[in-house]
Image: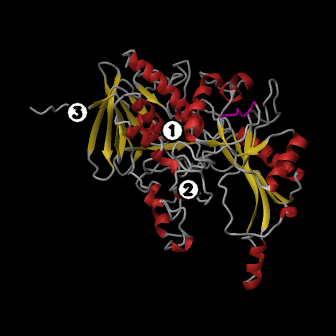
Amino acid sequence: MQDSRPELFDAIVVGSGATGGWAAKQLSEAGLKVALLEAGRNISPKEFTEHMPGYKLPYRDMSPEIARTRPVQKQCYACMEYNYDWFVDDQQNPYSTPAGKPFTWQRLRIVGGRTLVWGRQSYRLSDLDFKAASHDGYGEDWPFSYSDLAPYYDIVERYVGISGAPEGNGALPDGQFLPPMHMTCGEVRLRERVQEKFKRTVTIGRVAMLTRNHNGRLACHYCGPCERGCVTHSYFSSPFTTVADALKSGNCKLVTNAVVSHVDMDPSANKAAGVTYVDRVSHKTYQVRARTVILCAQALESTRILLNSKNPEYASGLANSSGALGRYLMDHAVGAGAAGEMPEFLTKSSASEPQRNNGIYVVRFRNVLNGERHPRFIRGYGYQGGAAMGFQFGAEGFGASYKAAVRRGVYGVQLGAFGESLARWDNVCEIDPNLKDAWGIPALRITMTHGTNEAALMEDAAISAAEMLEAAGAKNIKINTEVSEPGMAIHEVGTTRMGNDPKKSVLNAWNQTHDVKNLFVMDGACFVSSACQNPTLTMMAITVRACDHLMERFKRNEV
C-alpha cells in the first residue's frame, strides 16, 4: 500500500536570496532535510547579458513592455530591457499606499532574488548601531552586541569574498578582506584632504566582488554592468554559491514558482506545521510540511505572510501578541549629497577602460562619541561616491561640435549620503482588505514617511559633502538636500523586530518568534534600527548565527 502521508522536512525556508540561501546551506550541510521555496523561476548564466552591447536591444532600453508591466520596478537602476523579466510584474503584484505618501517597493521573483542585481556594498555594524538607544535614548537596543555577531561576520565574509581595506575606525569595524580595489587619482586626493582637514575616513568600498580567485569563483574582470549578471560569478549571488551548496549537500529540495500565501498551524500544539503556496504558473495550491518554518522572503514579504496567517488564536497576524508585527518599517534616507569637477585630473575619455563597479565610502562621523550630540539630529550618515573621468553627456552643441564636447569629457566627483532611518511605530505595512495579487493572496498597504530627523540628516550631509569636495579642490560644486521617497534605498528593514521583551517585539535574539517556538524570521525584518550602513552583510551574519542556534535545538530535540 502506498504511503499517502506528505513528506515531512526538518525545515522549510521561504525565499532563496541573501538570507534564504544561507539558511538552506547551513541547515542542509548540517544534515537537516530542507525544502527551499522560491516564488520565482530558476535562472541560468545563459541569461546573463553583461557583455551584450546596447545596440542589440530591440528598443534600446525603452521597451513599452517595461513601462506597461513594471512602472514601479523601473524606478530601480537595475531594471532594464536586458533583465526586466527578473523583476515582478507590478500588475500581478500590487500593493497600495496612502494618498500623498508614496513608497517604492522594488523586488525580484527569481532564484536568488535581489542578490542578482544588488550593489554588493558590505559593511559591518558596530555597537554604535546595536546599542544606539543606550547612546542617545531613542528606541530600543538590539538584543545582542557586536561581539556576539562578529564571529558570524567572519564566517560570511570568508565565504562570500569581500574586497576592502582595513581602516581601524570604530564606527565601521574592519573585517576579513580580500585585496582592495584601487582608488582613482581624484579619490586618493579626496581621501588625503578629508583626513587632513576633517579627520574623517574615506576608504574604498567594501564590496562582495572578488579581486582574486576565491572559493571556486573567478576574480572580477571589470566589465562593468553587474546588475545584468556575471558569468564568472565574481560577485556574490546566492544561486551560484549558498543555494548551489545546499543542493550539493543532497539534503535540500528546491521548489520554484512557489508563491507562499500563509503559514499553517497545528493549533493543538501552538506550532507551525508548514506552509501553503500557490504555484505561480498553474495557480494550483499545495502544502509543504516541516518541523520548523523559516521566513527569508524579504522584510515586507515575510511580514505579509505572517499577517496573512492570522487565525482565531492570532487574530491580528501570526506571532503578533505584541502588536509590533508590520510596525517600525525603515529604509535608509537617500537623495542628498554633492557633486563637482576636478579639472586638474582631466585626461582623455575612453569607452574601453576597465569598469570598476565599486566606489568609495565615507565612514559616519556624526554622533559617534559618547556624550556627543548634534544639535539638530540623532544618529548619522555615511557616503558612497567616486571620482573618475567620463564622457560629458550633458555637453552643448550640435553635430561635430557636440561630439567633440562629449569626447572632451569631464573629471567628476560626487558623494551621495545614506542616512539612518529611525524606527517609528507609524511606519507600517498591513493587509489591504480590498487588494489581492494575481494568485488571490491579499496584498500589502504600506505607509511610510521620512521624518524631521531624516530631513535634518540629509541637509547636513549635503553641506558636509560640499565642504569635503571643496577641500579636495573640486570646482562647480552642486548640492542636493532633498530626501528621496521611502523605498528608493532598497534597504527595507524592520517590521518583525527582535527584542528581549515579548511585549515590545516579535522575535527573540535568535530570530525565533516569541509566540510560536518553531517559527523563525531570518531576513531584514528582524532589524531593531537601520544604522546607516547597507544591511545585507548584517542580514547574512544574523542568519548564520540563528541557524547555529536552531541546529543546537535540533540536537537537543527541542524542535
Q: Residue type at mark 3?
A: Pro
Secondary structure at numbered mark 3: loop
Q: Is residue 162 above or below residue 150?
A: below
Q: Is residue 146 above or below residue 302?
A: above
Q: Residues within 10 Å of mark 1 (few under 14, many from 20)?
A: many
| Cα distance between the residues tagged 1 and 2 | 21 Å
> Residue at left 38%, top 16%?
558
Point out the residue furthest to the bottom here: 399
Secondary structure at numbered mark 1: helix
Residue 36: horizontal and vertical position, in percent?
38, 39
Would residue 345 appear left or right of 358 to someone viewing this image? right
Q: Earlier in the sequence, mark 3 or mark 1?
A: 3
Q: Residue type at mark 1?
A: Ala
> Residue at left 73%, top 79%?
403
Frontmost of labels 3 and 1 is 3
Frontmost of labels 1 and 2 is 2
Q: Which residues are magenta?
A: 170-175
For the question of whether residue 255 can be seen, the reply is: yes
Residue 203: horizontal and vertical position, in percent?
76, 44
Q: Are marks 3 and 1 in contact (CB under 8 Å)?
A: no
Would residue 284 appear left or right of 84 to someone viewing this image? left
Q: Read off the residue under disc 2.
A: 227
Color theme of the render: secondary structure
Looking at the rendered structure, which numbered label has been put on residue 6? Answer: 3
Q: Earlier in the sequence, mark 1 or mark 2?
A: 2
Location of residue 271 (image quadrant) = top left
Taking depth in this image into account, of 523 and 537 the one nearest to the observer is 537
Q: Read off the residue under disc 1.
A: 299
Secondary structure at numbered mark 2: helix
Residue 158 magenta-highlighted: no
Would residue 342 appear left or right of 522 to someone viewing this image? right
> Residue at left 31%, top 45%?
278
